[in-house]
RNA sequence: GCCGGUGUAGCUCAGCUGGUAGAGCACAUCAUUCGUAAUGAUGGGGCCGGGGGUUCGAGUCCCUUCACCGGCACCA
């Protein structure tokens, strides 16, 4: 019996049932047979050697088809690497090895962990395997046979993996030469189809079996692979670029902050770093006032009874710094905790005195200094710290105000992100998790309100199914930085639970007591982390208004020293952050040094400037020089130094 | 927290199989007054992350601890 095959060019042809795509390709041309790497059959990515048993649409792929060829190259390299590892260390047990962004990884269970010196050896072995041009073969086995095979060959992880394949499905087995692996496919025709010089093993790492920290830790090797050497080089260059913008490196180079052993995860902010920090908090404070927030400040150290009432003691204790006073000397033996979050304290302020529906919505903001005991392995520069300040607020409102408050919030957030240089952001919407509190009707209303508000603003969102907080759904705001990385910063969470637990009430129009809804929200997340993101986004070249040192007045001859100091004085009076550089150095030296330290503007002053009352202006990253009268220059940069919300026309 | 790696001058790093610490930059002093990305000379600077051990002798070997880095887990 024949089957009909539909080609992408509209052509149609009949073939005997059981024909493989390899045979179809061979029938079209010998060169296509040779160049073919895989096929998309009825929308699914297949091996060439897989037989067709029914009518199908077939697209034959060659190395020119990017997603398919990259997937195959990386997937085959995962197998080739696993084979190389097992050839070098026969005791290593294979587990899983998926394709990931830019490459692949493979996890092994091996008694002796890999060392970095092993990577070149493995790479070498992989090239040997590629050069063998071993054919790739696949078969479908009944699961019992496969299980038996892996039991007898001492591969317990494969046995466990088969257990995860649905009962009614057979198991696909692949061979790269003699080496065998359980795999869904597809794969290339032979190992020689993988380019031998476009991959690189990058790193070794520990990883828990099946991603669960209760399981054994396996040894993982990461690799990257591309279709050609240029792409690999480009990728490695990109990594190098990313390293250059690492905020930890920039932070010490620019003398913004440092960390030290005695206070892991807690930043020491230096004068310049703190200037940036203050510019940002000042800006946020003005925006918040503009958007109808009141600002509060609450205690750092709070007795555990409040954390018990809020639920943190039970749910969050292992992340809290618990503080108990010295038993011998203390008159009262309390157990306190440093606050990891501000919400319970904000409810205390809300609860002070009576609230009426007329007070709602009440938008209560705090630049809340929080301390969390983060696991040591999670710490990462400013991005993950133990002490940080959130741009936090809680909006106490009635249920029917959720939508308008959400819309108002997203409006503020998009304005702030734009001001800070992130015009693009995505929204993720996380709906009800399996384990939750509150009635389904309440959830229906809360979810609908969030969606309506997002849509009313014309924002599209991505569903993050079942990822909501246990007390309510949330929106997550993800911005994209200059080199395409995503950072989740903003969040808006609907909370019905905390008002209940901490007994927040208001008197409604009907004269009865009601529960307010609480919206937890942040735009930047934490100032520490956001400054880290800013530094990486701008590669240290912060916008003028955020720059710690905005203008250096550098002298060319010492006769101009006095004039330089006068210029600095004038700049400072105009609100600019300026320093004079009257050191006994050449102007070349000064320009180089200040440029490297990313000062946005250099005013050079020499004999001419002194005589004419002018400055020679050099803007970082620009070629030309410009000479201007001092008054004009001060006016220009004073205007440029205005934060986005204070600019004329803003 | 877990796996692996790293820790030497302010910074970047060298220091072979154990024999008593070195370079460049930075810093200080002096000379130089110079026109937009490195002027020259001279000089000072180290508890080799902390603790313990082996040894006649430890930056080097062993144990332990802390921090950092790459991941995993966590978190958002």
Image (cartoon, coloured by chain):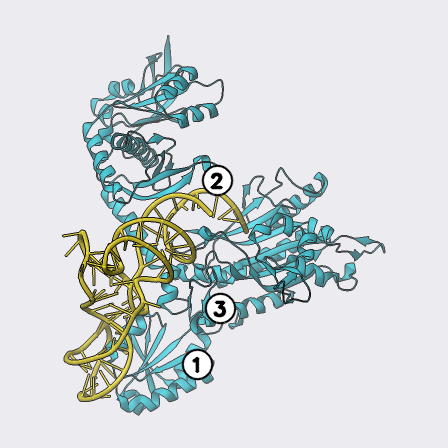
Chain colours: A cyan, B yellow
Residues at marks 1 and 3 on the same chain: yes
Splitting the image into 4 quarters, where does residue A606 fall? bottom left
What is the spatial separation of the Cα atoms under label 2 and label 1, in whole angstroms? 59 Å
To which residue does mark 2 refer? A213
Q: Position of residue A595 (x, y in %)?
A: 31, 71
Judge the density around disc 2: few (<14), some (14-19), many (≥20) Cα neighbours within 10 Å: few
Of badges 2 and 1, nearer the viewer stands: 2
Q: Position of residue A504 (x, y in %)?
A: 75, 56
Q: Quadrant of the N terminus of chain A?
A: top left
To which residue does mark 1 refer? A635
Judge the density around disc 3: few (<14), some (14-19), many (≥20) Cα neighbours within 10 Å: many
Splitting the image into 4 quarters, where does residue A109 fall? top left
Of badges 2 and 3, nearer the viewer stands: 2
Query: SS of the residue at dot 3?
Result: helix
Query: Which of A298 and A578 lies nearest the eye of the viewer?
Result: A298
Of marks 2 and 3, which one's residue comes earlier in the chain?
A: 2
Judge the density around disc 1: few (<14), some (14-19), many (≥20) Cα neighbours within 10 Å: few
């Amino acid at each position: 019996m024949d089957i009909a095959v539909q080609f992408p060019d509209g052509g149609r042809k009949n073939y005997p049932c059981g024909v493989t795509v390899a045979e179809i390709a061979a029938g079209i041309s010998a060169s296509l047979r040779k160049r073919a790497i895989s096929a998309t059959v009825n929308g699914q990515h297949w091996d060439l050697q897989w037989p067709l048993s029914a009518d199908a649409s077939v697209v034959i792929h060659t190395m020119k088809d990017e997603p398919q060829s990259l997937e195959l190259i990386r997937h085959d390299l995962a197998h080739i690497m696993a084979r190389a590892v097992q050839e070098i260390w026969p005791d290593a047990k294979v587990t899983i090895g998926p394709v990931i962004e830019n490459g692949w990884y493979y996890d092994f269970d091996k008694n002796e962990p890999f060392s970095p010196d092993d990577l070149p050896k493995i790479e070498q072995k992989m090239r040997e395997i590629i050069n063998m041009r071993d054919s790739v073969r696949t078969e479908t086995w009944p699961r019992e046979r496969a299980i038996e095979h892996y039991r007898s060959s001492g591969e317990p992880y494969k046995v466990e993996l088969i257990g995860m394949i649905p009962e009614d499905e057979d198991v696909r087995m692949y061979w790269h030469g003699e080496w065998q692996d359980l795999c869904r496919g597809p794969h290339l025709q032979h190992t020689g189809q993988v380019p031998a010089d476009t991959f690189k093993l990058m790193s070794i790492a520990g990883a828990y079996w099946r991603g669960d920290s209760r399981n054994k830790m396996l040894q993982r090797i990461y690799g990257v692979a591309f279709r050609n050497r240029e792409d690999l080089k480009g990728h490695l260059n990109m990594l190098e670029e990313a390293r250059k913008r690492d905020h930890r490196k920039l932070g010490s180079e620019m003398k913004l902050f440092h960390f030290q052993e005695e206070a892991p995860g807690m930043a020491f902010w230096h004068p310049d770093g703190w200037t940036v920090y203050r510019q940002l908090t000042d800006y946020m404070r003005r925006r918040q006032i503009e958007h109808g927030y009141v600002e509060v400040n609450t205690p750092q150290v709070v007795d555990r009874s409040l954390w018990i009432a809020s639920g943190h003691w039970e749910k969050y204790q292992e992340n809290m710094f618990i503080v108990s006073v010295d038993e011998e000397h203390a008159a009262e033996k309390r157990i306190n905790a440093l606050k990891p979050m501000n919400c319970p304290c904000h409810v205390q302020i809300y609860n002070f005195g009576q609230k009426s529906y007329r007070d709602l919505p009440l938008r209560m903001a705090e630049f809340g200094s929080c301390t969390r005991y983060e696991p040591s392995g999670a710490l990462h520069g400013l991005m993950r710290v133990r002490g940080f300040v959130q741009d936090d607020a809680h909006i106490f409102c009635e249920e029917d105000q959720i939508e308008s408050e959400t819309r108002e919030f997203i409006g503020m957030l998009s304005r702030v992100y734009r001001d800070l240089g992130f015009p693009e952001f995505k929204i993720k919407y996380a709906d009800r998790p399996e384990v939750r509190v509150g009635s389904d009707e309440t959830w229906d209303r809360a979810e609908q309100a969030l969606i309506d508000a997002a849509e009313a603003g014309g924002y599209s969102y991505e569903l993050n199914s079942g990822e909501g907080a246990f007390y309510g759904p949330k929106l997550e705001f993800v911005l994209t930085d200059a080199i395409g990385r995503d950072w989740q910063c903003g969040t808006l969470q609907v909370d019905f639970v905390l008002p209940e637990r901490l007994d927040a009430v208001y008197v409604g129009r009907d004269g009865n007591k009601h529960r307010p809804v609480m919206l937890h929200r942040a735009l930047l997340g934490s100032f520490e982390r956001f400054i880290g993101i800013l530094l990486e986004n701008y590669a240290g070249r912060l916008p003028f208004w955020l720059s710690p040192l905005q203008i250096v007045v550098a002298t060319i001859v010492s006769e101009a020293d006095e004039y330089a100091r006068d210029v600095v004085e004038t700049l400072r009076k105009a609100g600019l952050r300026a320093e004079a550089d009257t050191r006994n150095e050449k102007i070349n030296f000064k320009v180089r040094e200040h440029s490297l330290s990313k000062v946005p503007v250099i005013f050079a002053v020499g004999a001419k400037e002194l005589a004419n009352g002018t400055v020679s202006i050099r803007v970082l990253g620009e070629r030309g020089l410009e000479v201007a009268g001092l008054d004009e220059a001060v006016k220009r940069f004073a205007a440029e130094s205005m934060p986005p919300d204070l600019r004329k026309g803003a």
